[in-house]
Every structure is written in structure tokens, then in C-alpha cells.
Image (cartoon, rainbow, N blue to C red):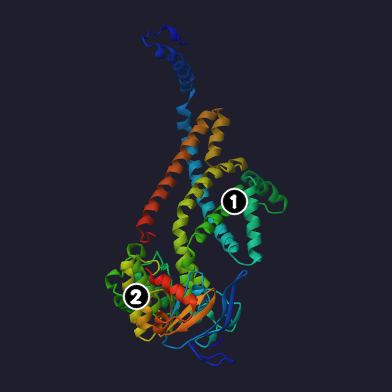
Amino acid sequence: MVNSHSIPTHSPTAYCLLPTAYSLLTPLRAMLENFSFRTIVEYLPLFGQGLVTTVWLSALSFVGALVVGIVLCAMNLQRGWLFRAPAKAYIDAVRATPLLAQLYFLYFGLPRLGFVLPELVVGILALSLNSGAYISEIIRAGILSIPRGQVEASVASGMTYTQRMRLVVLPQAFKVTIPPLLGQAIVLVKDSALLSLISVAELTRAGQLLASDRFMPAEGFLTIAAFYLLLYYGLKALAVLSGRWLGTAGARA
Amino acid sequence: MTKAGMIQPGLTKTGMIDFRGVNKWFGALNVLRDITLSVEPREVVVVCGPSGSGKSTLIRCINGLETIKDGDLVVDGQRVGDPATNMTQLRTEIGFVFQSFNLYPHKTALENVTLAPIHVRKIPRAEAEHAGRELLAKVGLADKVNAYPAQLSGGQQQRVAIARCLGMRPKIMLFDEPTSALDPEMISEVLDVMVAVAEEGMTMMVVTHEMGFARKVAQRVVFMDAGAIVESGTPDEFFSHPKTDRSRAFLSKILRH
């Protein structure tokens, strides 16, 4: 109980604002009083395990997504429709549907079709297949950003398609691609939270456990938010570092 | 597949580059009209004409950067566009210098020069690097061996581009407006290198409006307009006594500046 009228003040403005400030602060103070840091500390090993799982399954999924992305991009850059059409259809299908629907399809649908896989494998598969579609477009944009003159110069010097990709186009596209790829990695880490819904014991799952075991959703989800923020800053630092490294790696064109 | 330098069956060897009734369209636009032109070995031919007249397209057809619609184009005894012709192989014999240099920005000057010799010609790296250093010295850039293109001026970049072509030891060098993108004070350093290449007996086709260069080394000037060769003659004939109204009008415009 706070009686704001009992506080003496000489400024009419402050006098008007004070009740507002108190009405905002009061619930915050009440919140902090109810917020159990002790439980968070108690659950820290669980959060730690969740964090580790999120990190390695995201890393694995990212590698998988890179493979999917490179294959899709290679198909998409072909002249003939034979490879290009399925790649385009796949990319559209993935981008048009929610990741959750894709995840549920793999988790609930595949066993019905005869493929029974552990949830962790399903999760990594879903993230790889989903992120791969976006990554293929990032790589394609990187390759297409290389000026036509570069291709012409290498063609004119008698290079084969493979040689000019390997020696001229891809090394340049690589540098353009790194920053958006790290952006996609950040998205992937956040998307991995959905795996909690198929009971993969990752970071968000740890928050859910705290929420349901002790009925402490605020503690649970604020803590995982903090951990995600940590991961985000880690990847962002990597992006800055890679940018700096690429900037000094020679070509400044 | 025919080896480079050998003449494909059904062809009589005449020039190093032989256009016989070549036509090309961009949509409805007839960009090359019935081109017949033969360039002898060691000959230097300058191609000039107003913008859009098809000069660049003409020389881009020679190494297959553009395809021709009909007619015959025979280069070094190989019919361009013929399925029997190994274009990749033929291109190693043809150096091409672009208006915008097109150096590889992620490679040093030396790496730009040695990339194709090492990977296409399969010359051992040490040998290619030795030759590359010599070529860069020849174009006056011995001190820029390890510089990246972005650290070089336009004139220096174009000289590296010429050295890059020479590294392949080509039989033919094509130049597509090599000095048009350069500041005036850099033009002569590039032209000097081109003169030196011409004097060594290289077969050259040069799209340029540099009359000093044409007078100095060209045996022939070809004037194009609207996709057709309108006039052709020695530099002296062409610049001093142009025969057609079109070439007179063109020359009066480029001479005014």
C-alpha cells in the first residue's frame, strides 16, 4: 500500500507525475519480490544442459543446412529445368509453410510412412531442411552478385565452368555470403526453440520444465531469454570478427 | 576434336581471323551485317566507328563471348561455334583485354597473371610465377607484383590485364576499348604497352579511337557503322582521305576534341 498524496512536493509537475511513477513501480517491486532467483540457481544445471544441447544441435543443423543449401543452389543455377524446377519448388514449399508445420510433418508424419527416427534426429533434420532453403538463396545471391566481367574474363582465359567457379566466382561469393549466413545462423538458433515441442531437451525445454514443475514461467522463460541473448551476442561477435578478417584478407573491391 | 593450329577439314587456311559473311542479331536488331574480314598473322587491325556500330560485338565473337547467327568465323584454323571446335582450347590462344579491366579483385597482380597459366595451361607454379614477374616488369609494374587490383590505378590495372593475357602466350590479342575507361594521363602508359606488344609481332584486333596508336602500329583501320564494315584501309588513307560520308562525319566528330 502506497499513499502518494502524503509525499510533500513543491513542483506541480512532479506532483502530477509521482502517482504514475508509483503505479508503475509498485507492480515491478511486487514482481521482484515474487521472482525466485533461488529457483533459477537451483535449476541452473538444467539450463546449462539445455544451452549445451541448443548449441550443438544448432551447429549440426547449420552444417546440415549448408549442405542442403549448397546442393539446392547448385541445382538452382543449372540451365536446364530438370534440376532447377525441383529446387525452386522445394525452396518455395519451405518458405511458404511454417517451420512448426514442417517439424510436425516430420515428427508425426514420417513414422506413419515407415520412418521412425529419434526426436533429436527429426529436429536436426527439420532445421537443416528448413534453413537449407534460405541458405541456398543466400548463396545464390552471393554468386549472382559477382560482376559479369569476372565470368567473362575467366571464360576468355580458357577456364572451364568448374575452374571459373572454383578459382574466380566462389572465392569472391564466399566473402559476400558470410555476414548473411551468420544472420541465418542466429535465426536457426532461435528456431531451434521449436524442438521443445517434440520433447528435445534443449534450452526452451528447460524453461518449460521450470514453468510446469514449479509453476514459475517468469523465471523459466526470462532465464532462457537471457541465454538466447548470450548466444546472439556470441554469433554477432563472430560476424564482426569475420567482417574484420575479410576486410583485411586482401581484396577491397 | 581438332588440335589447335591444325585446319579443320573443309576449310582453306587464309587469315588468322576470318569472317565470311557473318551475321548476328540482338532480337530484331541486326548488330553484325554480312561481315567479311580477314586478319593475317602478325597484322594489327584497328576497328573504329560510332557507339553501337557493332565493333565490340565483332571482336567478342572471335573468342565466343558472343555467338554468331550465320556465316563462317574461322580463327586459327578452327570454326567458331562448330561443335567440333574445342572453344575452351581455342580461347587459350586468344587474349582479351576488356574496357573495364575485369581483374580478379581477390588476387594479387602476380596471381592474376599466373592463374590461367597454372590452371589452364598446367604450367608449374614456379615457372608461371617467374614468367609472371617478367611480364609485370615488362609492363612497368615490377614493384606492384603483390598489390591487389583495388590498390592500383586504372592504367596500372589495365597493364596488369594485358600482362594477364600475355601470360597465356596467345597467338591473338583482342582489345575492347582498352583506354576508354581511363583518365587521360593514364592512356599513354597503356598504349605504350600495346605498341610494344604489336611490335613483337602479335596478331591484334583493337577497338579504339586512339588515332596515334592506329597510325603508329596498325596496318589497317576498319570503320564500322550500323553493324556493317563501311570502309577499310591503311591508317593514312582512312584518317587523311576517308572515302565515305559516314566516315568523314565520324572523323570530324572525334577530331574536333
What residue do we see at 70% from left, 49% from top? A109
Residue B77 visible, this angle: yes
Q: Which residue type does callout 1 highlight? A: Asn
Q: Horizontal placement of B33 versus B210: left or right?
A: right
* Nearer to the camera, B83 or B97: B97
Residue A117 visible, this angle: no
Q: Name the residue tied to disc 1.
A: A130
Q: Outermost residue, front direction?
A: B245
Q: Where's residue B62, x and y in %?
A: 51, 79
Q: Mark 2, chain letter?
A: B
Screen quadrant of the C terminus of chain A = bottom left
Q: Secondary structure at mark 1?
A: helix
Q: Name the residue tied to disc 2.
A: B191
* Nearer to the camera, A141 or B25: B25
Q: Secondary structure at mark 2?
A: helix
* Nearer to the camera, B214 or B129: B214
Q: Horizontal placement of A191 versus A104: left or right?
A: left
